[in-house]
Amino acid sequence: MASNNIKKDHVTDWFNYIAFDLWHEIGDPEAEKYFWLKGPWLTWLATIGYMYIVMKAGPDFMRNRKPYDLKLAIRLYNLLLVVINTYLFIGTVRSFRYGLDFWGCGEPISTRKREIMLHYGHLFFHTRYLEFFDTFFFVLRKKNSQISFLHVFHHAIVPTLMYIGLKFYPLPFNSLLPSTNMFVHIIMYAYYGLATFGPEVQRYLWWKKYLTTMQISQFVLLIIHCAHAFILSKTRSDCQYPLTMVVINFFIGLTFLTLFVSFYRQTYKNSQRTSIRSAKQQMDANTKSSINGVKSPAGIGPGSDYANNSISDGDLLIKQKYS
């Protein structure tokens, strides 16, 4: 009996150590001040909850319901993310010599700068949970076709990656991708919000075609940044880059670059096929309506943008997100 109690106590102690104590012993001491950085469990629990909602609970809830009209909520949501990301981007780049520190030699930083980085990084970390609503809005509007593997994978994996960076490596080197991502999100969510106002505003959103390039470019920049850090760490003895994080960041950049480019190509091909089919339908419709000399108004037909209330395919990765 005593032996069984000892075994139970040993198992309990081991579990408590793995679940709680271990995470207090490892990582950056400054990160311990932040509740969500004390251990990975809240992050993983939130991610599991997100995946359950978007893959099971949400679609089941909406199965026999009509799509919700969420335009006002979506506009406010996008405005909020533009404001938050603007604040975070300006604060981060100003704190690190407008990004020059991101390309430094991995030198140790002062406690004050570490606190600043954790402050902005921790706030940005929380926006990753807020962005779960990207998918929740899709579910509530029954836009299930837009809940792609890339979309769900991106939202599910990023919080864990950010946790690792903030918990173990709160260094200027690790701020490049978040800072770039903040800037991309300012432009991206501004576009999403403006696009909800319909064709009157969408005609001025010609710059939407550059969003895809921006999304892909940030991962190319990350790969270049990792190569730069690796070369410096091997050629200069005074460089102190954490090679583990360099490797992790490199594979993050490579993975997302591969996924985004693959999705871009697939969407572009589908877009071309759709455009060709729409053009053919338009020609057929115009031909039929031209009988007896009566021709339909230009641009109105089964395949036109007017008919299907869509916008043109400039923004391939974000096509019709809020249309």
Image (cartoon, rainbow, N blue to C red):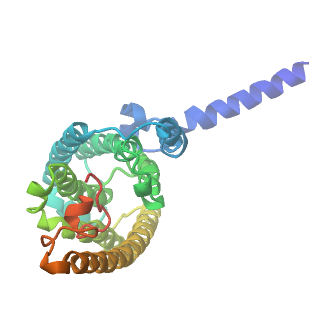
- Most extreme residue toward the top is 1
Question: Left or right: where does residue 101 sit relative to residue 162?
Answer: left
Please name whichever residue, 281 or 287, is drawn nearer the observer in this view of the structure: 287
- Most extreme residue toward the right is 1
Residue found at x 45% / y 44%: 27
Q: Is residue 105 above or below residue 322?
A: below
Image quadrant occupied by the C terminus:
bottom left
Q: Quadrant of residue 5?
A: top right
Residue found at x 20% / y 40%: 80
Image quadrant occupied by the N terminus:
top right
Please name whichever residue, 85 or 52, is drawn nearer the observer in this view of the structure: 52
Question: Left or right: where does residue 156 sit relative to residue 281?
Answer: right
Residue 218 visible, this angle: yes
- Give the percent coordinates (x, y) of residue 194: 15, 51
- Give the percent coordinates (x, y) of residue 312: 22, 68
Question: Left or right: where does residue 125 sit relative to residue 1?
Answer: left
Residue 311 visible, this angle: no
Residue found at x 19% / y 62%: 306
- Give the percent coordinates (x, y) of residue 274: 34, 74
Q: How many marks?
A: 0
Question: Left or right: where does residue 290 sit relative to residue 270?
Answer: left
Q: Quadrant of residue 116?
A: top left
Q: Is residue 193 above or below residue 312?
A: above
- Most extreme residue toward the front is 292
Q: Is residue 9 above or below residue 222?
A: above
- Give the percent coordinates (x, y) of residue 33: 36, 32
